[in-house]
Structure formats: C-alpha cells, structure tokens
Image (spheres, grey):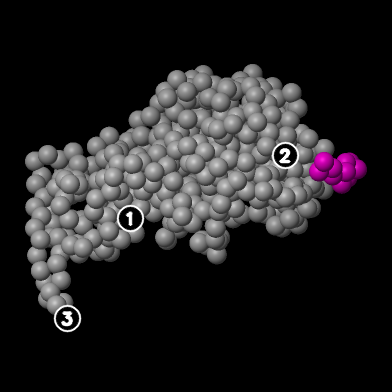
Amino acid sequence: MMNIKTLAMMAAMVLAPMAQGQQKLPAAGDENHAAVTETAEERDLRMGWWRQAKFGMFIHYGLYSGLAGEFQGKPGGSEWIQTNLGLDTDTYAAEALPLFKPKAGCTEEWADLAVKAGCRYMVLTSKHHDGFALFDTATSDYSSAKAVGRDLVKEFTTSARMRGLQVGLYHSVIDWHHPSYDNTICPDLCYPVNQARMLKEKGIPRNQAAYQEYLHTQVRELMSNYGTIDIMWWDYSQGAAEGERAWKAPALMNMCRELNPAVIMNNRLYSFSGFDTSRDGVQLDLRCGDYTTPEKRIPAKGYPGIDWEACMTVGDKWGYNRYDLNIKSPAMVIRQLQQCAAKGGNLLLNINPMADGTVPEYVKEVFLRVGKWMELNGEAIYGSYPIYDITLPEGWMSCMVYEDTFLFPPALVTDNDVELLIPAYEIDSVEPEVLGQPDCKVTVERIELPGKEEPRAFMKFVIPASAWKNAVEGLPVIRLLNIH
C-alpha cells in the first residue's frame, strides 16, 4: 500500500532506497577486495546527496576531441580512435596534440550549462584510455598542463564548486600511452595494434607493477590537489584485468577513502560491462564500489536493492565526432530521466566538447530544453524513489518524493480528455494537480467496475488534453498530493 507513510519513513527511503536487498555491512575484505568498514547507516548518510541528485553531467574531453572522429581523413570513432585505427601513441599524439586548444573559460561554460539543465553534479574525464591527463601531474609530460599550460581539472573543479555542483572525476585505469601498462593480462582487452608492435620493436618490456605505481600516484594527485572529490568514476575492467591483479584496487580504493572519506566510487575497478544485461538483477558487492553503471541503456526493472546510474549520450558517441548526428530529442532525454526516477537510479548525461572546449550547439540545445522542463517539474525527479505497488497503463511511469506520488504520462496528441484508472486499494485520498499548470484541473472520483467475482473499486482521474498541449516538450507531470 502507498497510502500514509510518515515523513521519517520517507526520509529513510530516500537515504536507503530498497536497502532490504543490500549486503550486510561492515563487510570483511579479502585478497581481491578492500574491507568496507562503515555501517549501513553511515553509508546511507554518505550516499544521501547522490541519491537525491538524480541528474548529472558527464564530460568527455581530451586529445581525441580535436580529431573530431577521423585521423588523416580516415573515420575511426571518437575517444577510442587510437585503438580503433591501431595507432601507436607517437603517431596519434603528433596528429592530435596540435588540434587540442581549450579556450579560456570553457569549464565555466560547461558548469553554466549543467546548472541550466538542472544537473546537480558533474563528472569530467581526468584521463581517458589514451593516457592524456587533463591535470598537472608530476608523473608525465603527456598532459594538458605540459601541452597547453592548462590544468583543466583545476579549472573544472573550481567552476563546478562555484555553482554549488558536486565534483566527480572519470579516470581510466586502462592506458594506451604508458609503456609499462600490460594489456596482455586480458588478451581481449582492446589495445592499439601498432602500439604493441612499437614497444616490441624497441624492446620495451611490459611491467604492470610499474604501471600500477604510476596509476596510484596520479590518483593520489587527483585526491590531494583539487579539494574534495565527491565521485571517482573508474573505467574499466574486463576478465582477469581487474581488482588486485590489474590495478591493486583494494589499496587504490583505500587511498581514495583516506584522502576523501566521503568519496563515492563506481564498480569498474572490477570486471563489469555496462552493456551486459545478464548482470541485471545480480547483487552489487559493495567492496567493488558504491554503485553500478549500465551504459547507454536503462535496465528494464532498474536494480532493486542497489544504487545505480545510467550513463547516456546525446548522440551516439562519447567524445566529439563531427559525423555523430543521430541526436536524441529533448523529450527522449526527459523520458530517460523519468525512467531513472521511476526505477530508482540516476542519469549521467554526456556532453562532448569540441577541440576548443565549446559544446556543440545541438548538444547544448538538448540540455537547455531539458532544463526548461526541469524548472517546472524537477521536484518530481530530485529525491525520488520507485513505487512497486501501483498499476498503470503501458507508457505511464511513477515515482514518489516524500509523501507525494508523481505520474509521468507518455507524450500524447489528443483533443480529448484522458481517463486514468488506478485500483483504489493502491491509492486513495489524493489531490491531483498538473505541475506548472494551475489552471489545468484534474478531477478524481472513486468508482466501481464489474469484476470476476465482485465489483472492483478504482480511482478515476480525468486529465484535460490541455495538460499535454501546454506542457514543456509535451510531457506533463501529475502530482497526487497525499492529503492525509
């Protein structure tokens, strides 16, 4: 039943959504996992802001941004172009470095766009798989600080914090540039063919221990030199290339927690594919991370009992690609936000700045139009959690925020009022309204309809067609205000 619930219960559910399915804490470590020393209550407090936020901005920016999807006239993808075309790092960098020209104030523009879109946090690629760092590191000259005299992580963290946004860093544990990185731990792990050939011809041996030291040193710099880091978004592990063996993950995670005790980390230090639907419904081991990350998809039923975040693109690519023109409509993105709210997850939506850091206009337009919808309807997204005992027609979704129920109807083109029936035992004593449309009056009455054995009681809602016609992007939100 979703009738009367106390505010205390609601607050607890916001802090710990579906926590009944989660593993018991504290959890002992082993040779492949760091122990989780906090209690479930302590974890809920640490995760609280993230669970409330619901909507974040992902930013894929790096050397690949200047290539814009092709190398010397040959198409090859975006952030994966080096390995897609098999390029050794010298050949790749010679072409890409001269094109990488971040303009002054680009991180300010990103943060302004995030605020206008209604995002509550931002996650920037501090280093992608090509190994080029967007921060000032003592470990390497392969960085924005050395290449163009810009510590973009510093600029980014400052821009985000000035606007009240939580700060996250994506960091690749894969590295196609560092000569010691040993991709052979997992033969299926993608690696540039000509980089492997170059290292072999030069007689440069792989030394994963040396690479692990490099990785840990860079992460220590990120954790120490840029203030509080709220999120570490690791990417990625596969097969045997995971955990202790590949990254010394237990020590890496412990270091992050020591330097930033409230940091939230995803689960990609351990073998995981965001595309693998066979993992849906599998419990998250909290020793691997705080949340799981389905990629470019929203799981059919969410992940009841665990925290999750769907990472999505506006087009098809993560990094900038001039040929990436299959752009999602604002309405499609809003429906994804609604799905995440209805299923208990977050949405991390990507921008892909060009070589100078400018966000493509068509991407910016989507974010701005989503932001207009959020201005009126954000209260149905922030702090939401799923309802599992409400029966709705196909295409309708719902969530709760404290004591109120929010309904997300599908887009409709109609001149007629729309009737909605919800079994009366699932809901009662509510006062319906359309968010942002005070003159749009939704009526509700209790009715009985014939059943197999006896009449069944329903709450009948009649929603004016104007709710859709006057809604931002044609997607109204109906609040059922609990009047008990």
Residue in the image at 9% along x and 47% along y: 441
> In the depicted view, which residue is nearer to us: 156 or 45?
45
Label 1 Cα crowd, 10 Å radius (few <14 / some 14-19 / many 20+)? some
Chain-order first, disc 2 or disc 3: 2
Q: Alpha-carbon distance for marks 1 and 2?
A: 38 Å
Marks 3 and 1 close (CB-CB < 8 Å): no
Residue 480 on image: x %, y %? 20, 48
Q: Which three-letter amino acid code belongs to the residue tagged 2? A: Ala
Quarter that holds the N terminus: bottom left
Residue 370 lies within the magenta run: no
Would you name the residue on which mark 1 appears?
387
Q: Residue at x 51, y 61 (%)?
A: 280
Quarter of image, res 235: top right
Identity of the residue drawn at 11% across and 72% down: 449
Whether residue 317 can be seen here = no
The residue tagged 3 is: 453
Magenta segment includes 203: yes
Q: Helix, strand or loop at disc 1?
A: loop
- In the displayed structure, 434 sits above or below 114; it is below
User: In this picture, which residue range is highlighted in magenta?
Assistant: 199-209
Mark 3 element type: loop
| Element carrying mark 2 | helix
Q: Position of residue 229 (x, y in %)?
A: 56, 29
Q: Nearer the viewer, residue 225 or 307?
A: 307
Which of these two is toward me, 224 or 174? 224
